[in-house]
Image (tube, rainbow, N blue to C red):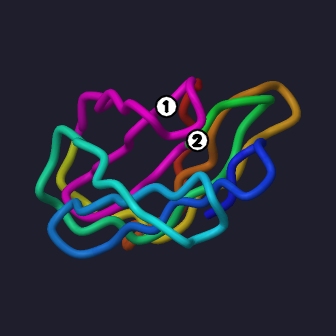
Amino acid sequence: QGTAKEGEVLVFGLRGHVFRSSDAGQSWEQVYVPTEATLNNGIRTGSSGVVLVGQSGTVLLSSDSGMNFTKREASHLDAYTAVATTEAGGLLLVGEKGVRLAQN
């Protein structure tokens, strides 16, 4: 997942692991995230936002290009496999039980 800054990229996946590179993948640093759930998908939002989604209703939000993340409280434990933004700034969360609309 790219961020708004050139050469900056995030990779994420099993057990909530997130790694960030600011030099186009030449070096990596691990980013702490408040979950151990597998992360399935992510998008860039606005000028420096990042949203990651995954198992157990996990939605992680960053406002600093993926340097720090906060966890949105899950209202269920369904897995999310995709995420998109709406024109109004909300999030479309796609998962095993369909599509949900959430405010960003």
Q: Is residue 103 above or below residue 40?
A: above
In the foreground, 39 or 27: 27
The residue lying at 61 percent from left, 64 percent from top is 1
Amino acid type, label 2: Val
Circle 1 Cα neighbour tier, 10 Å, few/some/many (<14 / 14–19 / ≥20): some
| Residue 34 located left or right of residue 29 | left
Which element type, helix, strand or loop, lies under badge 1?
strand
Q: Quadrant of the C terminus?
A: top right
Q: Position of residue 85 (x, y in %)?
A: 73, 43
Label 1 amino acid?
A: Ser
Q: Percent position (x, y) of residue 23? A: 63, 59
Question: What residue sits 76% from the left and 43% below the top?
Answer: 5
Range shown magenta: 51-75
Disc nearer the start of the sequence (2/1): 2
Q: Position of residue 36 (x, y in %)?
A: 11, 57
- Secondary structure under badge 2? strand
